[in-house]
């Protein structure tokens, strides 16, 4: 069973097994909301350092409240390395992997501006979850296939993401369930439409911001 709550951009609270994971939170969440919804945060992931994905003040609040592990790209690492606990800080570049909290985390290069932006694949027991940052398509993503759940960027304000690129990513990943995010409502709906037209064997869930969704996968 996997549960998630999306808050806009690519900000996701992900609950898999007994782990509470925060992906690209920016400042879209509040500490009170996370405390009430999850109780604790075990790890926070940052794909890159752009506003909307990363906020240093909110990370400081997360550290004070939850003391999570931090799995970050090179750009975020450069920003926070002097003021965080190195025992809980992990930097990943493209092609690198790590093991933390019983899960395997893999990174590949995102097709997006920034200082070595990445996408993540989380392997937790028999589940594989893809978080696509704000990336465009890359053939490298085929290395992650197949996946249980894929959060796929769908458009604005990313210069690389679009519904067309999202469908190319979905074809590469072969996910059981797709959640289009990082786009306006019309772009998220367009991803769903294109997946149906392409007869791809995957379930699409168009999320509502702030709604907790539970999946039996």
Image (cartoon, rainbow, N blue to C red):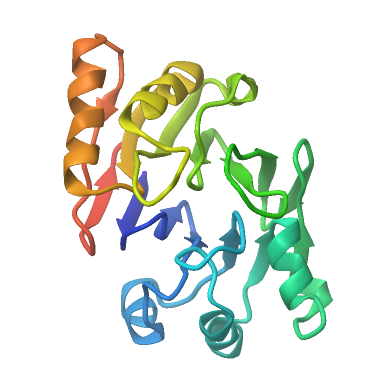
In this image, 123 relative to 99: left or right?
left
From the viewer's perspective, is residue 184 above or below residue 64?
above
The x, y position of residue 194, in whole percent, is 23, 20
Query: Residue sitting at 68 percent across and 41 percent down?
Result: 107
Query: Residue sitting at 67 percent across and 67 percent down?
Result: 70
In this image, 128 relative to 157: left or right?
right
Front residue of 115/88: it is 115
Q: State how many labels appear.
A: 0
Query: Residue sitting at 26 percent across and 10 percent down?
Result: 198
The x, y position of residue 187, in whole percent, is 23, 39
The x, y position of residue 183, in whole percent, is 30, 47
Residue lying at the far front in this picture: please name it: 159
From the viewer's perspective, is residue 166 above or below residue 9?
above
In this image, 169 relative to 184: left or right?
right
The x, y position of residue 168, in whole percent, is 43, 20
From the viewer's perspective, is residue 156 above or below residue 74?
above
Residue 82's image quarter? bottom right
Residue lying at the far top in this picture: please name it: 199
Q: The N terminus lies in which quarter of the figure?
A: top left
Q: The C terminus lies in which quarter of the figure?
A: top left
């Amino acid at each position: 069973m996997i549960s998630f709550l999306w808050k806009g951009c690519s900000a996701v609270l992900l609950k898999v097994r007994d782990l509470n994971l925060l992906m690209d939170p920016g400042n879209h969440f509040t500490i009170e909301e996370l405390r009430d919804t999850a109780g604790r945060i075990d790890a926070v992931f940052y794909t890159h350092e752009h506003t909307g994905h990363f906020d240093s003040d909110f990370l400081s609040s997360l550290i004070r409240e939850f003391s999570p592990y931090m799995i970050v790209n090179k750009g975020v690492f450069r920003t926070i390395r002097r003021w965080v606990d190195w025992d809980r800080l992990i930097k990943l570049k493209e092609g690198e992997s790590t093991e933390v909290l019983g899960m395997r985390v893999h990174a590949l290069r995102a097709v997006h501006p920034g200082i070595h932006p990445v996408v993540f694949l989380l392997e937790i027991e028999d589940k594989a979850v893809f978080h696509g940052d704000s990336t465009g398509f890359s053939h490298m993503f085929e290395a992650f296939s197949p996946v249980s759940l894929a959060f796929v960027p769908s458009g604005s304000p990313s210069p690389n993401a679009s519904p067309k690129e999202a469908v190319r990513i979905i074809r590469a990943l072969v996910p059981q369930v797709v959640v289009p995010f990082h786009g306006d409502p019309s772009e998220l709906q367009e991803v769903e439409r294109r997946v149906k037209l392409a007869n791809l064997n995957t379930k699409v869930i168009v999320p509502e911001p702030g709604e907790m969704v539970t999946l039996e996968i």
